Amino acid sequence: MNTSRMNVRGAVTLMLACGIGAGAGLSSMVVGAASDTDSATRPPAAPTQESVPNEPGREPGSRRHLDRSGRRQVGKASFYADTYAGKKMADGTPMRLYSNNAASVSLPLGTTARVKNLETGKTAFVTIRDRGPYVKGRIIDLSPVTAHLIGIRRRQGIALVEVIPISFPAGRS
């Protein structure tokens, strides 16, 4: 095996590990680097961008697009388990069970939003500080105290809510 082909494979592997690359162009680079004569001894090609796993619940190769439209979202809300207390959230702050922390996949970090439990009519204001939930149909994870304020009990675990962004952060998240 010549060194130029090894360097190309190493670069491709590094690019894939970092999430860089352009699917078909990347795979053609791998195929083009090898000659047809040694295909029987060649190890399997590195995975392309499409097969590199992303976050749970997202299509492989898709990119997260943050929603700054201000439109209301309706879906299920869940809440953090007590085991997450003190762990670092996406914005770098520790998770506080008795605060107005929340997690959203689509809203920018630092967004203030109003969450309304559609079953009880109770509302609370939260600040998006983390990413998640990564469960289909769920749009927000709340701190346990916020979930309790709007009427989500531990036994039920989830509730149908409406999330309306109130203010967005000045920078990008």
Image (cartoon, rainbow, N blue to C red):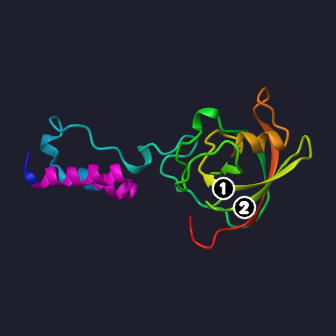
Vertical relation: 106 (above or below) 68:
above
**As drawn, is 135 to the left or to the right of 29?**
right
* Cβ–Cβ under 8 Å for marks 1 and 2: yes
Is residue 11 shown in magenta? Answer: yes
The quarter of the picture where residue 151 lies is top right
Crowd around label 2: few <14 · some 14–19 · many ≥20 (10 Å): many
Pick the residue in front: 26 or 109.
109
**As drawn, is 39 to the left or to the right of 119?**
left
Residue at screen point 67% across, 50% down:
101
Vertical relation: 142 (above or below) 126:
above
Q: Is residue 155 visible?
A: yes
Pick the residue in front: 97 or 114.
97
Tag 1's secondary structure?
strand
Amino acid type at image mark 2: Thr
Spatial separation of the CA atoms under disc 1 and disc 2: 6 Å
Crowd around label 1: few <14 · some 14–19 · many ≥20 (10 Å): many
Pick the residue in front: 27 or 96.
96
Residue position marked by numbered label 2 in the rendering: 112
Q: Residue furthest left?
A: 2
Amino acid type at image mark 1: Ile
| Quadrant for the C terminus in the image | bottom right
Residue 128 got which mark? Answer: 1
Residue at screen point 37% across, 48% down:
48
Give percent across and percent down for residue 39: 18, 40
Range of magenta residues: 4-28
**As drawn, is 40 to the left or to the right of 133?**
left
Q: Earlier in the sequence, mark 1 or mark 2?
A: 2
Q: Is residue 76 visible?
A: no
Tag 2's secondary structure?
strand
Residue 145 got which mark? Answer: none
Give percent across and percent down for residue 1: 8, 45
Give percent across and percent down for residue 12: 27, 53
